[in-house]
Structures are given as C-alpha cells and as structure tokens.
Amino acid sequence: MKETLDTIAFQAIFEHSNVGIIMSDESGLISKINPFAAQMFGYKTEELIGKKIDLLLPERYREKHVGQRESYYKKPISRPMAKGLDLLALRKSGEEFYVEISLSYYKMNNELQVISFVNDITEKKKIKDALKEQALMLESRVEERTSELRDTLNKLNNVNIDLQTEVKRREETERQVRQALEKEKELNDLKSRFVSMASHEFRTPLSGIMTSASLLEKYQKEEEQPKREKHLKNIKKSVRNLTSILNDFLSLDKLEQGGTQYHPTEFKIAAFLNELIEEFKLTSRANNEVSFTCNAEDSIVTQDQEIIRNIIANLMSNAVKYSDENAPIDLELKFEKEFFVLDVRDHGCGIPEDDQKHLFKKFFRAGNVTAVQGTGLGLNIVKRYVDIIGGEISFTSKVNEGTCFSLKIPVEHK
C-alpha cells in the first residue's frame, strides 16, 4: 500500500512540477519527460519519448554534446542547479533560448538513468545581460568621468603650478622692488651724507684760505713777515686738507670703476714697513711717536706694495687724527703660517659701540669725531683694498682708550 502511495506522489510531482524534468538512458534516448519540459520545448510528451536528447540542442552543438554526454555517463556526478550550465536549447519551432540545467542520476536494473532538470532562463538571461550591459555602461561612464576628473585635476594642477609660478614671480618682483627702494634710500642717505660732508669739509678749508689770503694783503711791511708766514702756513694746510679729500674721492671712484689692479711683487715686509713709517713721520707733521715691532725681520712676502702702502698710510693717518698730539702709535707685525698679521694701535678717542657696525660704510663718521676734519671714506677705501689683496680686517675699540685695527693678509695672494 505504501509503495503505491509513494508511486502516486512521485508521479504527481513529476507531472505537475514547474521545472522541466527529462530522463534519459546511457544511449541518450529520452525515456521520460514531464509536461512542463515538453511544453518548454514546444513538443507533446509523446513526440519526445524514445528520441535522442541531442534533439533539444541547436545542431551546431550536438556533435560536441555527444562527447560530453558520453564522458558524463562514464563518471556521473550530481550537479545542483546552482552549479548548472547556461546553455542554448532549441524549441520545436527552431527558436533558440537559454536554459539552466542541473543533472542527477540513478541506476535501475543495472542501467544508468540520467535526470536533467531544465529551467528556461531566457528572461533571467535578458535581465542578466541588461545588468551586465548597464554595468559596462556604468563602468564606461565611470572611466569617462574618471578621465574627465583626471583631466580636470591636471588642469587644476597646471593652474596651481601657474599660480605658484605667478606668486613666486610676484614675490621676486616685490623683493626686487624692496631692494630697489632700499637701494634708493641708501643712495639718498649717501647723497645726504655726501652733501653734508662736502659742504663742511670743503667750506672750512676754503674759508680759511679766503681769510688768510685777505689778511695777507694787509701785511705788506717787512716787520709783518711772521704774520704773513703764519697765514701762508694756514693756506698750505688747507690746501693739503683739500688735496686729501680729493684723493679720497679719486681713490673711491677708481675702486668702484675697477681701475685698481693687483700687481704683486716680492719684498721684505718688515723693511718696507720701516720705510713707510719714516715717510709718514716726515710728511704727517705730527708729534706722535710711532713704534714698530716684528717677529720676523727677514720674512719675504709676495703682495701689492702700493695697495699695502695705501692701507697702512690711511690707518696711521686715522690713528694720528683721532689721538692726542703726543699719544703713541704702535705697529706690530706677526707671521702666522700663510698669513702675516699687522696691528695698528692708537690710544685716542675710540669708537662708540653703537657706531662700530657702520664703520666701513661710505661717508660714515662716528658720533664722537664730527668736530675732526674727515670725509668718512678712509675706512671704506681700506676695506676695499683689503678685499683686493685677499685679506681680512677687524678692529677692537673702547671710547677714550683707543682703537686697534688688525690686518690679516696672505703672504702670497692666490
């Protein structure tokens, strides 16, 4: 009784299932097909019983399917629907459509029976293809948008680079403008200092010359000769002062125009300095005692004597100018490997600390020496000469104690 009920149940499932069920033997002949499968392929059930299952495939696939079917029969396995194949099937009308097939098998009377479960996935395939096409379109659009964004980013990057370049250009322009303004301010300051210096330094000796010349006209008697000599001496002193001022201007102009050339010769530096000191004593008309010490009397250097002469003469002149009449001036020469060091020391008024940083600027004069005649060019000229011969200049100073200028000059300028 139970077996009869099971058979009825199986038959009901087989007949009324919404999945196509096709049973075939080892030779590929259809032994049983449910109504749903027959309708799917456009056949009546009886039209397919005993026919090759290959009939349900497009002709171009049949030969290949025979080999696949025979391989399956040799080693049958169950293949669930989820792992089924998407295949093209053929309806009786000749219309091809997509199906999904899963396989199972069983043996009856030692004969292999294969069960094929078939689903029409035409609509599913259309949706899948549409989704795939949409995905491709979206991917293409994404790539397109990505490309557009990349181009936009590149353009923005180029714009950013252009902006950075423009910012740098403007910053450079602003820097040049600031430099030009600073240079103009510096030139205006130089002009103001020059005008102030020139009006004072030229007016004073010229006034002295005019006064002395006017008085000379009044002293015509023989017994007035001492008075005439006094005024002639004043005139000569004023002329020397004017000559010194003009020489400073000429030296500065020559240096700035590149007219001062370096001409080295070989000479004994100690002997050269001794001669220079003697010349200075004869021409300076000062009563200051000049002392000279040296740790290498016979040392020979290769340098430009004329430039060194101008440097030492200027420093010694300043030492005398800014010291009391009888204050000593000390020169000390020392050798240090490839350099010789010359110190020029006075015991004069010294340089205020606030003024020291400006000491080598053109037309600059310390605040405590404005009453002493000078152009404010001497130390600027000295610094330029020192640079030409490859040396260094430094100084130490205290107000009312004196100043020491130290020259470090290579034995041979390279």
Image: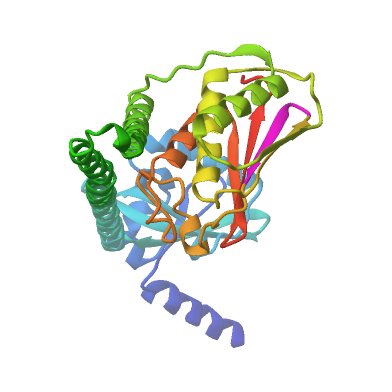
Q: What is the residue that sits farthest to the right in this orientation? A: 295
**Residue 404, image x and y in percent?**
63, 48
Q: Quadrant of the C terminus?
A: top right
Question: Which residue is at 34% across, 35% downward?
Answer: 245
Residue 405 placement: quadrant: top right
Looking at the image, residue 111 sits to the left or right of residue 206; the answer is right
Question: Which residue is nearer to you in this view: 358 or 194?
Answer: 194
From the viewer's perspective, is residue 23 above or below residue 68? below
Q: Please tell me whether residue 342 belongs to the stretch shown in magenta.
A: yes
Q: How many marks?
A: 0
Q: Is residue 328 visible?
A: yes
Q: What segment is highlighted magenta in the picture?
A: 337-345
Question: Which residue is at 69% across, 22% downward?
Answer: 269
Looking at the image, residue 285 sits to the left or right of residue 295; the answer is left
Question: Which residue is nearer to you in this view: 234 or 161?
Answer: 234
Q: Quadrant of the N terminus?
A: bottom right
Question: Which residue is nearer to you in this view: 382 or 8?
Answer: 382
From the viewer's perspective, is residue 16 above or below residue 148? below
**Residue 333, image x and y in percent?**
72, 33
Q: Is residue 67 visible?
A: no
**Residue 253, image x and y in percent?**
32, 28
Question: Which residue is at 48% across, 81% downward?
Answer: 8
Residue 246 placement: quadrant: top left
From the viewer's perspective, is residue 209 above or below residue 369? above
Q: Main secondary structure of the magenta part?
A: strand
**Residue 29, image x and y in percent?**
47, 48
> Which colour scheme appears in the figure?
rainbow
Looking at the image, residue 268 sits to the left or right of residue 160; the answer is right
